[in-house]
Image (cartoon, grey):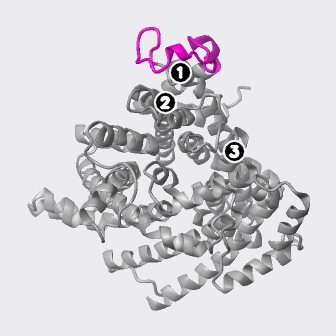
């Protein structure tokens, strides 16, 4: 007997089809692919060592030997920008995934069970939303100290309420769906219902929100590193490069220009993909 | 209406109370001893540290510590800065005008860019100008604000020497110099914020332009400009106000890095200094003040809704 193809697989296929029809999303995916390859093979791609300084080469304008010029210590900016992708992606990824791991289950529980649990969880979400995320992250860093993992954690705390609110809303709506009520009626266990029926409904909006949060986190990592609250030198980070470049920006504008472009492109890639995914899921939900 | 305001204020106080618990727990439950973190840089003598711990009440059980802080809060004392030796509230109040000016300036720039662009893009979806407008929004959303600020400083103050890049002058006392100093930081924040608002304006306009009364106005032969900016925009304003309100709330504390770059003596910079020096009491107090401001902004937004859309009444 021929088995029917899994409906979930069909959904994934349809969505992927929609995403690949969206020019913006495809551009975003290509850029992101290149950025990830750059991060993985940074050691092979970068023409110079990003950390060792060559004082005699200091502050050279862009040329064929130094595509983006050099900084005050004679380090090749191109090589440092390439290595900077690692820090940027690491912090963006860790903070977003952590925020989802904390926020999404709590939101789902609140939305699905309602009652006291929901009241407590929604109150916490509201409170966290009333504090600007930058301040929340600053507070956590003030306590934990500066550093790449501390920064990732601080951003995760700041982004958690976004995911709590998101999954709570979906769970609240899904709880009333006929097939969920049916499952409850035939006596399926609560945690099976949550995993099998509620969670799949949360995944599309979660993916969209996660992608957009990546984009924020890339900007936030750069900002916090700029403020010397993120990655410690000499590890190359785009934000840190910009704050170093401030001093000699007039004589060497390239040192402040290229790291910013790198931040912009990375954040833009995530935004393009996020928008594309949202449109793709929207189209699928409407039909 | 009055009932709604009173209700909002009451829930606001309840929320502030809950936030005070939250802030207190974040600071006290995360690992690290506040006294060593705060004074570790200067103070190594264990006896002295013990003395400080006692002085600031860190040797008391945690619920008593919270209770003491809460009692102080109720008397209007949100804590004292360890570094400045002054009440945190006074420090924050001193910094408030600079931040409020910055919020005002960036909102004006953001809205005067995003609303026209949003309306124009929505009037002809998928046209060339729509794409251009959306590219502008994407750039606004993806650009790191502090980098844009640096580039503007580089071009306008360092190369062209047109505008100052540093410091704040109260525009009420010295309008010309005040506005000159306000221009670059507001432009930086304005462009960044405009990205999100443009998208909201466009999608909100698209919703409204589908409605029957717009079709009717067009059929009646009304000039397109009047249809768009007078009839449609008015109904599309609510989501735009919502977003602008949220952004204002966040700007009050969130423009930390822009304030830092432009040497702007605002509240964001105060909290950044509190972070660098690990001034817990100042941090803990500032967050409460920000949360309170956030509620005030939300309340003002609620009131603006009523002004913009008379159908909204907060009764029931």
- Can residue B205 be seen in this snapshot? no
Q: Chain of mark 2?
A: A
Nearest the viewer among B249 and B224 is B249
Mark 2–mark 1 contact, CB under 8 Å?
A: no
Residue drawn at x 16%, y 64% as measured from the top left:
B217
SS assignment for the magenta stretch, majority: loop
User: Which stretch did the figure color magenta?
Assistant: A40-69
Residue mark closest to the camera, 2 vs 1: 2
Q: CA distance from mark 3 to mark 1?
A: 30 Å
Closer to us: A210 or A233: A233
Vertical order, A45 against A121 (above or below): above
Q: Are marks 3 and 1 on the same chain?
A: yes
Task: Determine the secondary structure under disc 3.
Answer: loop
Is residue B18 shown left or right of residue A36?
right
In this rendering, do the residues under marks 2 and 1 share a single chain? Answer: yes
Q: Which residue is mark 3?
A: A146
Q: Position of residue A36 (x, y in %)?
A: 59, 24
Which circle, 3 or 1, is nearer the viewer? 3
Q: State which quarter of the image contains the N terminus of chain A.
A: top right
Where residue B306 sits in the image (x, y, percent)?
36, 79
């Amino acid at each position: 007997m021929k088995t029917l193809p899994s409906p979930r697989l069909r959904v994934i296929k349809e969505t992927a089809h929609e995403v690949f029809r969206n020019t913006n999303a495809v551009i975003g995916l290509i850029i992101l692919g290149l950025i990830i390859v750059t991060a993985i093979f940074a050691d092979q791609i970068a023409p110079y060592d990003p950390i060792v300084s060559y004082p005699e080469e200091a502050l050279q304008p862009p040329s064929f030997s130094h595509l983006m010029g050099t900084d005050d210590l004679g380090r090749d900016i191109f090589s440092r920008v390439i290595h900077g992708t690692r820090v940027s992606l690491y912090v963006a990824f860790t903070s977003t995934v952590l925020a989802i791991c904390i926020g999404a289950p709590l939101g789902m529980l609140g939305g699905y069970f309602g009652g006291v649990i929901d009241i407590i969880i929604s109150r916490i979400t509201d409170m966290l939303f009333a504090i600007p995320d930058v301040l929340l992250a600053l507070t956590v860093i003030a306590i934990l100290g500066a550093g790449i993992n501390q920064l990732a954690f601080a951003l995760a705390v700041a982004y958690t309420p976004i995911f709590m609110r998101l999954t709570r809303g979906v769970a609240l709506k899904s709880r009333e769906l006929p097939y969920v009520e049916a499952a409850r009626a035939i006596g399926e266990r609560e945690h099976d219902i949550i995993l099998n029926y509620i969670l799949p409904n949360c995944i599309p909006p979660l993916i969209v929100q996660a992608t957009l949060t990546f984009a924020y986190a890339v900007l936030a990592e750069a900002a916090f590193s700029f403020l010397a609250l993120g990655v410690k030198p000499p590890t190359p980070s785009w934000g840190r490069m910009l704050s170093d470049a401030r001093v000699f920006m007039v004589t060497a504008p390239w040192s402040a220009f290229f790291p910013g472009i790198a931040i912009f492109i990375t954040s833009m890639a995530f935004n393009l993909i996020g928008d594309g995914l949202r449109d793709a899921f929207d189209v699928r939900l409407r039909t | 209406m009055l009932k709604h305001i009173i209700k909002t204020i009451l829930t606001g106080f309840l929320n502030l109370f809950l936030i005070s618990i939250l802030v207190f727990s974040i600071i006290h439950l995360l690992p690290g001893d506040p006294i060593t973190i705060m004074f570790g840089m200067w103070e190594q003598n264990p006896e002295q540290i013990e003395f400080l711990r006692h002085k600031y009440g860190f040797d008391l059980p945690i619920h008593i510590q919270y209770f003491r802080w809460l009692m102080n809060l109720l008397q209007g004392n949100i804590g004292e800065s360890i570094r400045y030796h002054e009440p945190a509230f006074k420090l924050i109040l001193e910094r408030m005008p600079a931040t409020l000016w910055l919020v005002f300036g960036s909102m004006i720039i953001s809205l005067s860019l995003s609303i026209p662009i949003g309306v124009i893009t929505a009037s002809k979806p998928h046209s060339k100008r729509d794409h251009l407008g959306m590219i502008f929004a994407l750039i606004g959303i993806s650009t790191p604000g502090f980098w844009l600020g640096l580039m503007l400083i580089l071009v306008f103050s360092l190369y062209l020497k047109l505008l100052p890049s540093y410091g704040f002058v109260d525009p009420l006392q010295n309008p010309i110099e005040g506005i000159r100093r306000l221009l670059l930081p507001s432009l930086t924040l304005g462009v960044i914020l405009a990205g999100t608002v443009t998208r909201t304006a466009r999608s909100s306009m698209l919703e409204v332009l589908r409605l029957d009364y717009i079709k009717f106005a067009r059929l009646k032969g009304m000039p397109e400009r009047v249809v768009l900016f007078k009839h449609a925009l008015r109904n599309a304003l609510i989501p735009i106000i919502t977003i602008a309100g949220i952004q204002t709330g966040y700007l009050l504390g969130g423009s930390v890095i822009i304030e830092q770059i432009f040497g702007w003596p605002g509240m964001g910079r105060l909290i950044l200094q509190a972070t660098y020096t690990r001034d817990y009491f100042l941090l803990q107090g500032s967050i409460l003040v920000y949360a309170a401001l956030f509620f005030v902004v939300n309340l003002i937004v609620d009131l603006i809704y009523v002004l913009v859309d008379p159908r909204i009444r907060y009764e029931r």
